[in-house]
């Protein structure tokens, strides 16, 4: 494994789902579906300290990003943006041409990266079968509070000459 440098932010795909679950539980975020085999979880480290997490749930040529969290002491230093960028790359690598997410009150954060609000019902249809969507479909009251966001990533990695 690559050695982490003190004071340097690194983002790594992880198999340590216990750590992911612990971080999300501390944050009060849902952990259902974290162990879905197709999912990808990324941890952000400052040196050797875990400081943030994000998950990607791919489905065919699209992917949902979820479970973004940065520890309070480490916020406003670009860790959140770096995790979103890494999740975008991970989704692209898995064949996604479109990226989606649900959020109650962080929509303005994601709009910084080009995400635009999209009708929730359409996003649910497009992603049926991924754990976070199935979780919400089983809990309509929780779901009613969510807004959905979409970003076209079909041009990621395209080289124009
Ligand atoms: C949202 C979150 C991941 C941002 O992490 P971060 O490491 O601070 O992000 P960055 O440093 O890249 O960006 C910080 C900027 O985003 C803004 N921001 C943070 N949360 C925001 C929100 N909910 N809505 C709008 N803007 C937000 C900050 O005010 C800051 O703005 P500035 O650059 O003008 O000072 C972090 O605040 C967090 O973990 N929040 C609680 C969990 C959460 O809301 N997750 C999203 C679930 S969908």
Image (cartoon, helix red, strand yellow):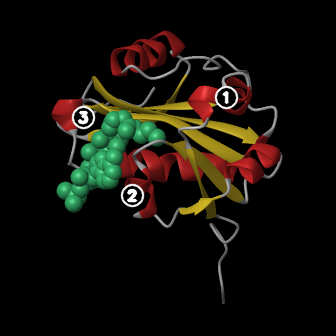
Identify residue for label 1: 140
Gap in angstroms between the C-alphas marked 3 and 1: 44 Å
Q: Is residue 75 above or below residue 47?
A: below
- Quarter assignment of residue 5: top left
* First along the sequence among labels 1 and 2: 2
- On the image, the x and y values in percent for residue 7 come to 17, 37
Identify residue for label 3: 5
Name the outermost residue toward the bottom.
161
Q: Is mark 2 within 8 Å of ligand 1?
A: yes
Q: Do the residues bearing badges 2 and 3 touch, measured as CB atoms within 8 Å?
A: no
Alpha-carbon neighbours of circle 2 within 10 Å: few (<14), some, or many (≥20)?
A: few
Residue 95 visible in this rendered orientation of the protein: no
Q: Is mark 1 within 8 Å of ligand 1?
A: no
| Residue at x 37% of width, y 54% of height | 109
Of badges 1 and 2, nearer the viewer stands 1
Identify residue for label 2: 108
Gap in angstroms between the C-alphas marked 1 and 2: 23 Å
- On the image, the x and y values in percent for residue 64 come to 65, 43
* First along the sequence among labels 3 and 1: 3
Please state if 49 lies on the left or on the right of 3 as rendered.
Answer: left
| Residue at x 61% of width, y 17% of height | 32
Please state if 123 lies on the left or on the right of 48 as rendered.
Answer: right
* First along the sequence among labels 2 and 3: 3
- On the image, the x and y values in percent for residue 111 come to 44, 62
Gap in angstroms between the C-alphas marked 2 and 3: 32 Å
Query: For the residue labelled by badge 2, is the local secondary structure a helix, a strand or a loop?
Result: helix
């Amino acid at each position: 494994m690559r050695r982490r440098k003190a004071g340097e932010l690194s983002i790594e795909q992880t198999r340590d789902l216990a750590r992911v679950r612990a971080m999300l539980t501390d944050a009060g975020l849902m952990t259902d579906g974290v162990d879905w085999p197709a999912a990808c979880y990324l941890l952000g480290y400052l040196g050797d300290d875990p400081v943030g997490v994000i998950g990607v749930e791919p489905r065919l040529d699209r992917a949902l990003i979820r479970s973004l969290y940065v520890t309070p002491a480490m916020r406003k230093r670009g860790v959140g943006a770096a995790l979103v960028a890494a999740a975008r790359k991970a989704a692209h690598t898995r064949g996604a041409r479109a990226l989606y997410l649900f959020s109650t009150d962080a929509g303005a954060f994601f709009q910084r990266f080009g995400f635009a609000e999209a009708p929730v019902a359409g996003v649910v249809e497009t992603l049926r079968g991924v754990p976070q969507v199935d979780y919400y479909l089983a809990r309509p009251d929780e779901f009613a509070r969510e807004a959905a966001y979409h970003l076209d990533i079909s041009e990621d990695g395209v080289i124009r000459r």
